[in-house]
Amino acid sequence: MKQSAYGLLLFVFLILPPVSHLLESIMIVHMHMQMPMLVISGFLMARFFQLQLPSFFDKWNPNGVPGLLLFIIIWSYWMLPRAMDEAITLYGVEIFKFISLPFLAGVALRDSWKKLHTFGKGVLYVFIMLVFLIMAILYIGVDEQLCNNYLEVDQKTLGWGSAAMAACMIIYGIQLLFTDQSAYK
């Protein structure tokens, strides 16, 4: 239960107005730091919900696929430039961000992870890698300002950051293909 308390502390820290304002003021920090940390806080808090509502998770997410799909849908939504922009300008959308990322995406990911087979985990890995590639192409290639709250240089920085993340994921995936993973289990 310690990790649930740590997840709650992380969540409370992230929703503090000075912290959230600071993290949202820089585009790459908003997308590549604040949003994943919100998912991680939900991932950590998920154990509490799993212990309190075991029949709900067994009925709702028996094989991990529904939770994986929920995570993919929520993560895809928050990668849209319009969603990031509205999270800054509209208070209701920001509240939705602070609810959907930890309590829907993070909890669903934690509940699904142990239930998924290697193929499902691979699908998630490839999906996230492709999202980073698409974001890199979008943010670097477009010469117009996509988000009203950020400068075009912030947009390019986010694009190059996404390209770096995608490159690291590709290198790690290639490394997994050419090494014997049974020696490390």
Image (cartoon, grey):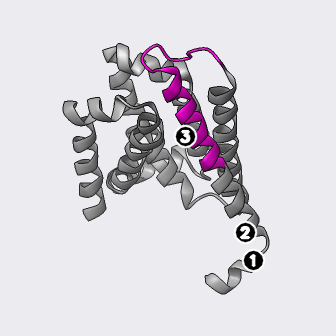
Residue at image mark 2: 175
**Magenta residues: mostly which secondary structure?**
helix
Disc with the residue nearer the chain's start (3 vs 1):
3
Which of discs 2 and 3 lies nearer the camera? The answer is 2
Residue 71's label in the rendered image is 3
User: The residue tagged with tag 2: helix, strand or loop?
Assistant: helix
Q: Is residue 109 above or below residue 131?
A: below
Amino acid type, label 2: Gln
Residue at 47% across / 20% down in the picture? 151
Residue 76 position by quadrant: top right
The kind of residue tagged 1 is Thr
Q: Is residue 1 visible?
A: no
Up-down relation of residue 136 to residue 143 (above or below): below
- For the residues marked 2 and 3, what is the alpha-carbon distance in whole angstroms? 26 Å
Percent x, y for residue 20? 28, 33
Taking the image as shown, residue 38 lies to the left or right of residue 2, namely: right
Toward the right, the furthest residue is 178
Q: Nearer the viewer, residue 183 or 52?
A: 183
Q: Crowding at label 1, few (<14), some or many (≥20) Cα neighbours within 10 Å?
A: few
The residue identified by callout 1 is 179
Mark 3, Cα crowd under 10 Å, few <14 / some 14-19 / many 20+, is many
